[in-house]
Amino acid sequence: MFKMKPYLAAASIALMAGAACAETAPDQSADETISFLAFGDSGYHYGYQKKSLWEKPFRTLDAVEADERKDWIEDKHNPSEFQMPSLYFHPEMGGYIMRSGQQPVADAMRAYCNEKPCEFALMLGDNIYPDGATMGTDGVDDAKRFEDIFTIPYKGLGESEEGFRIYTALGNHDWHTSREGAMAQVDYMEKSDQFYMDGIFYTVKPPSAKGEVELFVIDTEVMLSGMGYPEALLNDDGSEKKGTGPDDIDPWAMPANEAERNMVPWLEEALKNSTAKWKFVVAHHPLWSTGGSKFEQARALRKVLLPMLCEYADAYFAGHEHSLEIHTDSCETTPKGKRDVPLLHVLSGAAAKERATHSRFAAYQAKAYPQQTAHFVRGMIWGFTHVELKGDEGVVRVISTPTDSTGVPYEEFVFPFKHRSH
């Protein structure tokens, strides 16, 4: 049995409106619902670490803390709010690294789905750390990598649901080595009985939803690589600082053909013509987040995606930031203006690594962008989200699991939302 956990205001940002809504979440029975998981940034595994850490491991806890504090200050966080991630001593490396939540989160999802229906799942990119599939260039056969990172952790997940699949998007880390490496992962997913892909962007109607749900999976790394965006920089007070030049991109992630160059109009046309009741766009990069280092990417994506999402979609799912967040957008900045039902944004990127949110940036963003509302934000956490749909109502639940690796799921927050697409 999963455990209910009181919502901790000190550890989260939750507006009173969101909290009030959570108290009136609809009561949904299993035989009347469509239910699914969403988790992202799951590919961090002890067996696959950055080359720099192997070359110069942090051999003492003091060395790790000194490095973490240095990064904390450089990223303009409030020094008094400093938090250390949970650590693991890597015996082969001879030093400390960040603890992996991949297996505990997978265990927590299995435990949660023993109590509540989970008919399919969304995997939100950065499925393999640190550099995606390598085609063996790092001395490891990708077949072993896929076994370690996909098969072993998620064995048995969804086995009680007929036709259960994990619908997958790629993230920036999945592209780091080469286009061939990214395509190797796609090929694996396309042939898998548990996972699902149909190229790097695709639409699919999960069979268990009986045509009521359509997923629109896009590759925002390729999309952003074709658009370009400046580096995200903050002022000391957490406000946005104008970037001085384009951020780094992997050249092989640039759109390579006409279909990839036309991903944005393809998405709009697919959304517009969909016959499904619920339309969910699935990607890696968020439109809103509070980490303070992804806002230029988010700004670029909002410019091209938000008008069509506000017009045709019910929700947007993303990862990238290693946090759990629930936002809504009023759509008031789009050409057709504010909508009666805001657009739901689910950020579920805490399936393996911890990362702090940025309180200074969050406070700035709340004032600078009144069209977005942060209903729940929590970093330095492992977890996932679970969605239930019934009639014209939906509810998303934020689920955490402790960093002691017990794999016990805790319900952190419940947020109801309404059907809004045409």
Image (spheres, rainbow, N blue to C red):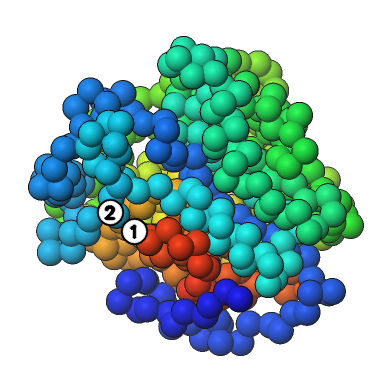
Q: Residue at x 44, y 26 (%)?
A: 131
Q: Residues within 10 Å of mark 1 (few under 14, many from 20)?
A: some
Q: Are marks 1 and 2 in contact (CB under 8 Å)?
A: yes
Q: Which residue occupies 37% across, 78% down?
A: 8
Q: Nearer the viewer, residue 323 or 338?
A: 323
- In this rendered view, identify the residue nearer to me: 208 or 215: 208
Q: Secondary structure at mark 1?
A: loop
In the image, taking residue 108 as reference, residue 352 lies left or right, namely: left
Number of callouts: 2
422, above or below 249, in the image: below
Residue 389: % across, % down:
74, 69
Quadrant assignment for the N terminus: bottom right
Residue at image coords 68%, 53% = 157
Expressed as whole percent of the image width and height from the top left, the position of residue 414 reads: 55, 76
Label 2 secondary element: loop
The residue singled out by tag 2 in the image is: 85
Residue 62 higher or lower than 381, as above or below: above
Of mark 1 and mark 2, the one earlier in the sequence is 2
Q: Position of residue 402 (x, y in %)?
A: 41, 65
Residues 241 and 410: in front is: 410
The disc label shown at residue 230, or none: none
Give the residue type that dot 1 points to. Answer: Met
